[in-house]
Image: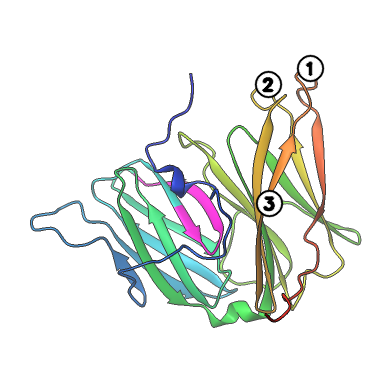
Amino acid sequence: MSRVSAVPVSASLSKTPGDGLGNLVGITPVAGTTPAVRGDQCRPTVQLTAVAGAMIHLALSAPCNRDERIVVRHSGLSFAARTRSDGTATILFPALRPDATVALYLADSRLVMGRVAVPEVAGYSRYAIMWEWPAEVELRVTDGDKVLIGTPPVIGGSDPRVMSLGSPDVQYPLMARVYSVPGKGLGQAALTGELRITPASCGRTLRLETVQTAAGVTKVAERSVAVPLCGTAGDILLLKNLGAPLTRPPPK
C-alpha cells in the first residue's frame, strides 16, 4: 500500500531549496493564527517562545486536528510531528535564525505561522539533515574520543549535541537530525550520515536535504543518494563530507 499524506506536498521536503519560506503574510510578533472565520471553532493558534540554548518552544492548539500529522518548517528545517488527542502539541526545536519564522502545515490544508526573536542563536553553529520515508538515517558526529548521535532536544545546555526531530509513527514520516555547537563554526568534528538499507529503500534513489548556519551564513542543499540494490538489506550506507565550512558568497 502506498503512503499518502493529507498535508500538502509543499509541507514536506522542498523541491527548490531556499533558506526562507517565500512570501509570508499574516505574521505576528510571537503568536500566529489562521484568518478568523465567523463561527469557526477549528481555528488553530500557535505560541512561540525563545528558551535557553537558542531553542524555540512551540505550543499549538488545533481543536479540530486531533491525533493528526503536522509539519513544522523553519528556515529550511522541516519535520513532521503529531497532535495529541485534544488537538494540542508542544514541540522543542533549535532556532536557525535570530528572526525565526515558523510555519505549521495541518492536515486540512490550514497553515498557521508565527515569528519569534532568538538573538542567542548568533552564538551557535548548526547543521541539519532531513529525510522522508522510506529513508532511515542517523547523523553521527565524531569529535576526538566523543561520538554523538541523535537524542531528544532539551532546554539549555551549551555542549555540542545532536537533536532528533520528527515522529516516526505518523502516516508519512519526515525526520531530521540537527548538530548544534557553540561558536562560529562546526569545528573539527567529523559528520557522517548512516543510511540504513531496508527492503523499502533498496534499489531506489532517495533525496536528502541539509541546512547549515554559522556566523550569519546559511546554506540549504539537496543531495540524491543511490541506494544499493536489494539483497543488501540491513547494511549501512555511509554518507561522508557533511558539514563543510561555510563561506560568504562574493559581493555582486
Q: Residues within 10 Å of mark 3 (few under 14, many from 20)?
A: some
Tell me how far mark 2 sits from mark 3, CA to CA. 24 Å
Pick whichever, 12 or 235, lies toward us: 12
Relative vertical location of residue 18 with respect to residue 225 in this rendering, above or below = below
Residues tagged 2 and 3 counted as in contact (Cβ below 8 A): no
Q: Amino acid at mark 3?
A: Gly
Residue found at the far front of this picture: 252
Disc 1 is placed on an element classified as: loop
- Residue 41 placed where, x, y %? 15, 53
- Residue 109 placed where, x, y %? 31, 46
Query: Which residue corresponds to the image point at 83% horizontal and 70% vertical from the top-left?
Result: 187
Query: Which residue corresponds to the image point at 54% horizontal and 62% vertical from the top-left?
Result: 93
Of the numbered discs 3 and 1, the one sitting upstream in the chain is 3
Pick whichever, 52 or 74, lies toward us: 74
Mark sitting on residue 231: 1
Query: Left of 75 or right of it: where is 162?
Result: right
Q: Nearer the viewer, mark 3 or mark 1?
A: 1
Q: Which residue is mark 3?
A: 150
Instruction: Please check the rendered image and state whether residue 82 is part of the magenta-colored stretch, yes or no.
Output: yes
Query: Which residue corresponds to the image point at 46% horizontal and 55% vertical from the top-left?
Result: 72
Mark sitting on residue 211: none
Query: Left of 26 or right of it: where is 207?
Result: right
Question: Which quarter of the figure has residue 101?
Answer: bottom left
Q: Amino acid at mark 1?
A: Gly
Q: Main secondary structure of the magenta part?
A: strand
Q: Which residue is mark 2?
A: 199
Q: Amino acid at mark 2?
A: Pro
Of the numbered discs 2 and 3, the one sitting upstream in the chain is 3
Of the numbered discs 2 and 1, the one sitting upstream in the chain is 2
